Amino acid sequence: QVQLVQSGAEVKKPGASVKVSCKATGYTSTNYAMYWVRQAPGQRLEWMGWINVGNGNTKYSQKFQVRVTIIRDTSASTAYMELSSLRSEDTAVYYCARDNGGILDHWGQGTLVTVSS
Amino acid sequence: EIVMTQSPATLSVSPGERATLSCRASQSVSSSLAWYQQKPGQAPRLLIYGASTRATGIPARFSGIGSGTEFTLTISGLQSEDFAVYYCQQYNDWLTFGGGTKVEIK
């Protein structure tokens, strides 16, 4: 069955970077794109970026464009999201989700990133 | 950016009753509208896509309707496992999500 397994929780200091991984199993990862979505406490879900896992093309939300990088390792069926220059407002749960034509049909379990001095 | 607005923010419903949730888009998204259910500590789960098509394994008590800018999710005969937060999401122009409707036990 389709599974997206993310890396574990992280605690970072302001100004640092965080890299979250998302390993896909149960399907051919290069056949689907991937979104990264975050959920800050009390805030709505918001998309951060998207990667075409097949060719590596990316698209970033304007809000995160200067701070986020999404890459993939097709040999490991794994996508990565790196967010830099962290601030307290970046404390959130970060999700990867399989893109099925804009429909997020499978989600990772989420990775809590806490930014605190 | 397309803004998605959900109402009400909280809906108190008794088990067995019907819940009606609304979602409005700031501009037309055609039928590119999905609904998700999220329980505490869990990732969202896809319920409905294309405004009205149930995802695999979703019970028939969940139904969606709408197009353009107005959408509705109806849960008929609420069961205990249905008390959760529900989000709408448009995918006509990248993604945006609504603020959610919490369905709580009355």
Image: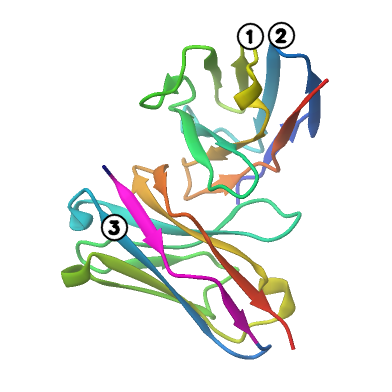
Q: Sort mark 2 into few (<14), some (14-19) or many (20+) by Cα contacts within 10 Å.
A: few
Q: Position of residue B74 (x, y in %)?
A: 62, 16
**Magenta region, mostly helix, strand or loop?**
strand
Q: Position of residue B33 (x, y in %)?
A: 50, 32
Q: Which residue is mark 3?
A: A24
Q: Chain of mark 1?
A: B
Q: Amino acid at mark 2?
A: Glu
Display coloring: rainbow
Task: Reply yes or no: does residue B28 show up in magenta.
Answer: no
Q: Pointer 2 indicates a residue of which chain?
A: B
Return the chain for callout 3: A
Q: Secondary structure at mark 2?
A: loop
Identify residue for label 1: B77
Q: Dots 1 and 2: beta carbons under 8 Å?
A: yes
Q: Are marks 1 and 2 on the same chain?
A: yes
Q: Residues within 10 Å of mark 1 (few under 14, many from 20)?
A: some
Disc number placed over residue B17 in the picture, else none: 2
Left or right: where A31 falls relative to A113: left
Q: Residue A58: percent from the left, percent from the top?
A: 35, 67
Q: Residue at x 23, y 64 (%)?
A: A77
**Secondary structure of residue under mark 1:** loop
- The x and y percentages for residue A12 are 62, 84
Q: Nearer the viewer, residue A100 or B106?
A: B106
Question: Dot 3: few (<14), some (14–19), or many (≥20) neighbours within 10 Å?
Answer: many
Q: Which residues are magenta?
A: A2-12
Q: Residue at x 83, y 20 (%)?
A: B106
Where, by quadrant of the figure, is residue A74 drawn?
bottom left
Relative horizontal placement of residue A38, taking residue A103 as reference (left or right): right
User: Which image quadrant: the N terminus of chain A?
Assistant: top left
Query: What amino acid type is highlighted by mark number 1?
Result: Gly
Q: CA distance from mark 1 to mark 2?
A: 5 Å
